[in-house]
Image (spheres, rainbow, N blue to C red):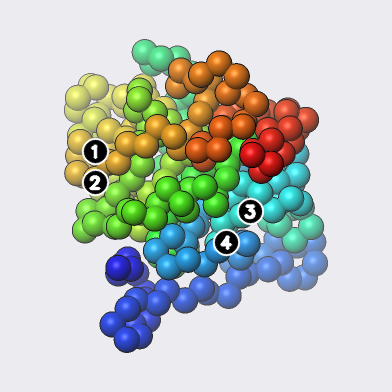
Amino acid sequence: EQLQVGPAAHTGGQAVHPRLPALTPEPEHQPPAGPATYTGVGAGVPGQSLFCYALMLPHSYEQTLLAAQHERKVSLFGCDEYALYSDEAIEVAPGLWTNIVDVDLKCGRGGEFGTALNTPIFLAVWRKLVSEKRYLYHAWTVKTDPDSVFLPARLRLRLQPLRDEPRGVYLNNCKFGLHGPLEVLSRNAVTAWSQGVQRCTEHFDRLCSGPCKWGEDMFMDQCLMKVLMVKRVSDFRILQEDHCDPPYGWKSCQNTSIVAFHPFKELAGYETCISNALAS
């Protein structure tokens, strides 16, 4: 059974989601005129196609990590289609450009858990992503952090038994609730999120007597689960990270059931982790 939402072409009773032609920079070393999305090295398996994105802080270690990932075709660059977002147009690698989001990427910390108060930033990114409509051509949309060692092939295996539902499906990756280094939403879940996020904002503003001091992952989790009634599927093998009570020795990245390890902010550590994971 294939997912049936979006501009699908129907053949023989089954939905076939064509890939739009990827946009490439023209002329050379100039940002593209339209949305910069790129065809990856995905498996092209019906029902498991991945549209992956990351938000990059310009002129930071994140840019270095993403350039190295692109060279090795790992992390989001192993998805069927991918995009990078930033508040500047930056050529991260030859021919690989960021999409500009009109938002200040600087944010403070606060709230009960001292988390980054980055909800407005990521809401702006999601608005941009949804407006480009590329997610409609894939079964799942994945947000990954630049310092996440993410293995798309493992995620596809984990998604095999799942099917989209009218209100959508998303994965909860931690026993403490959804954590931001890897967020996985079905096509219908992205649509529900985009259409209902304002309702969630108003709902939680009333509860918190103003903006809730949450990170974007907690806001998304609470919004999808409690307001929009999107189906929440918990899989704690999706993510292993320092803020979710990881087991001893997790940074060796040799656990073959884990989809993403986080964080690895230094290039040498990232390279060691991804090499160990791919060799396992």
Q: Nearer the viewer, mark 1 or mark 4?
A: 4
Numbered tag placed on residue 42 in the rendering: 4
Question: Which of pointers 4 and 2 lies earlier in the amino acid sequence?
Answer: 4
Residue 53 seen by the camera: no
Question: Which of pointers 3 and 4 lies earlier in the amino acid sequence?
Answer: 4
- In front: 221, or 121? 221
Asked if residue 247 is positioned above or below residue 258 in the image, the reply reads above
Question: Which of pointers 2 and 1 lies earlier in the amino acid sequence?
Answer: 1
In the structure shown, which secondary structural element does the residue marked by tag 1 occupy?
helix
Check disc 3 and report the residue beneath it: 77
Residue 239: percent from left, percent from top: 48, 33
In three-dimensional space, the C-alpha distance between marks 3 and 2, rounded to whole angstroms, equals 28 Å
Question: Which of pointers 1 and 4 lies earlier in the amino acid sequence?
Answer: 4
From the viewer's perspective, tell me whether residue 110 is left or right of residue 224: right
In the structure shown, which secondary structural element does the residue marked by tag 3 occupy?
helix
Q: Nearer the viewer, mark 4 or mark 2?
A: 4
In percent of the image, x 52 and y 67: which residue is there? 44
Density class for disc 1 (Cα within 10 Å; few <14, some 14-19, many ≥20) is: some
